Amino acid sequence: MLFRQIIHDDLGCASYLIGDDDAGTAAVVDPRFEIEEYLELARYRGVRIEHVLETHTHADHVSGHGRLAEATGATIHVHRAAEAEYPHVPFEDGWELALGRLRVRAIHTPGHRPEHTAFALVDTARGEEPWAVLTGDSLFVGDVARPDLAVEPEEGARALYRSLTEGLLALPPETEVWPGHLGGSMCGGPDMDQKICSTIGFELGHNPLLSESGEDGFVARALAGLGPQPPRFGDIVALNRGPLLTAGVRAAPLSAGQVAHLVAEGALVVDVRTDLQFAEAHVPGAVLVTHLRPGFGTKLAWVAEPAEPIVFIGRDDADGLRAARLASSVGVRTIAGYLAGGMTTWREERRPVARMERVAAEDLPALIESEPALQVLDVREDREWDAGHVPGSAHAPYHAIHGVPDGIDAGLPVAVICASGQRSGLGASLLMRAGAREVIHVVDGGVGTVERLGRPLERA
């Protein structure tokens, strides 16, 4: 039997290649947009990809089902409730697909979306009970799916509760749980783990949401943990439901002069290097979204306007090309190109640069005491701010910064802080782009570091 999990580290998505080596047949479940790894694995194992299974219409990333169907001739399957507009064979609860000795059984699990379906895997050579279940965006390791991307949140949460208690959790406790997302994805809550799998029994005993007694308790806790919705999720759903998308985005190499012209015309410049490299010198007005950390695509989708041309600037051409591929995975397709030769090209032509000051989180309290005019902007999420923040600081989640936030004077120095230094870099660059004169990026820690130094926090 063939079983492989393929992880998209930037988005925290997991997809699967399943099948039967001896029968030479396979299927891909929830494919990502870049399909090369599936094709390579299939060639290596000597199987044909004959089917593509979707647990649901994804809202956080663009599916590769169209590209796989074009490359292999595979048939796409999705639940009838998805109302997909592309060529497919719909199924309903209880549908089964035979892949040699492997039997895939559909378990309709609405909640995250009305069409959502998990797939139980039965190895008929070993027995008739499922040995594993691909839970998609229903049950995660340590958490459950968010219920607010397709229906009213409480309605979704109640449907998810019934899907779990009457469907997935009725499977044998030793059944392995292989989810569609790992920790860091926006399709679950804050308790989602980075572990790649679990079991039904372990989740019943240790998943906080499943420890709630009764439907009302489950619903209240599921709704209380909701974070911001994935950026552009409506557009991504439309792409995944509509006509098959088979072409990626071609990113053209650009000269420094072309980049300067695009900037003058209003293009968004995205610097994908490290925050240290950005601080030392960057194109004036650029925003910092490093591709060397998880979440690049999501952050980019939040800061880029839907029709806005985007120019990537990296260390070299490879950075620009990789950024364009990651952008495609979240439906950002207005790529004007990348600076050929990277930031070195800009510097060699002696074009103007901007710089950003940095301060270590452990040094921030002393800086606040020595600089009475210093402002602090916290760019974490609402629930993090409520749990504790630097006294006197202003608050605006980084993805909500579209100008100088309320409570901030653009003419006075401002230190931008988060939990680790990653989101604060993007927030600081957005603040500079909005016209703030003296912006300081708090690095090597964040609000938690300040608290560990013995400085009290304010709490909502």
Image: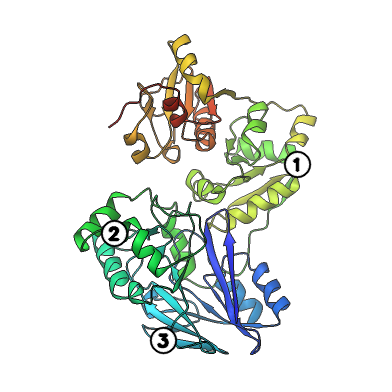
Q: Residues within 10 Å of mark 3 (few under 14, many from 20)?
A: some
Quick check: can you spot residue 325? Answer: yes
| Viewport quadrant of the N terminus | bottom right
Lower position in the chain sequence, tag 1 or tag 3: 3
Residue 140 - label: none
Observer-side mark, 1 or 3, equals: 3
Give the mark nearer the N terminus: 3 vs 2: 3
User: Which three-letter amino acid code belongs to the residue tagged 1?
Assistant: Ser
Residue 441 drawn at (x, y percent): 54, 27
Q: Is residue 148 above or below residue 454?
A: below
Tell which of 305 and 294 is nearer to you: 294
Which secondary structure, mark 2?
helix
Q: Residue at x 23, y 54 (%)?
A: 220
Residue drawn where x is 26% and y is 60% of the image: 152
Which three-letter amino acid code belongs to the residue tagged 2?
A: Ser
Closer-to-camera residue (234/3): 3
SS for callout 3: loop
- Using the numbered discs, state the Cα–Cα distance from disc 3 to disc 2 in whole angstroms: 30 Å
**Residue 211: mark in rendering:** 2
Instruction: State the residue position of label 1.
Output: 255
Q: Residue at x 52, y 87 (%)?
A: 126
Left or right of residue 150, residue 322 in this image: right
Spot occupied by residue 296 in the image (x, y as percentages of width and height): 56, 48
Please state the horizontal and vertical placement of residue 98, each as a whole percent of the image: 52, 89
User: Who is closer to the viewer here, 167 or 426?
Assistant: 167
Nearer the N terminus, badge 1 or badge 2? 2
**CA gap, disc 1 to disc 3?**
54 Å
Left or right of 304? Residue 147 is left
Relative to 194, is 347 above or below? above
Q: Position of residue 56 (x, y in %)?
A: 43, 70
Q: Quadrant of the C terminus?
A: top left
- Which residue position is annotated with label 3? 95
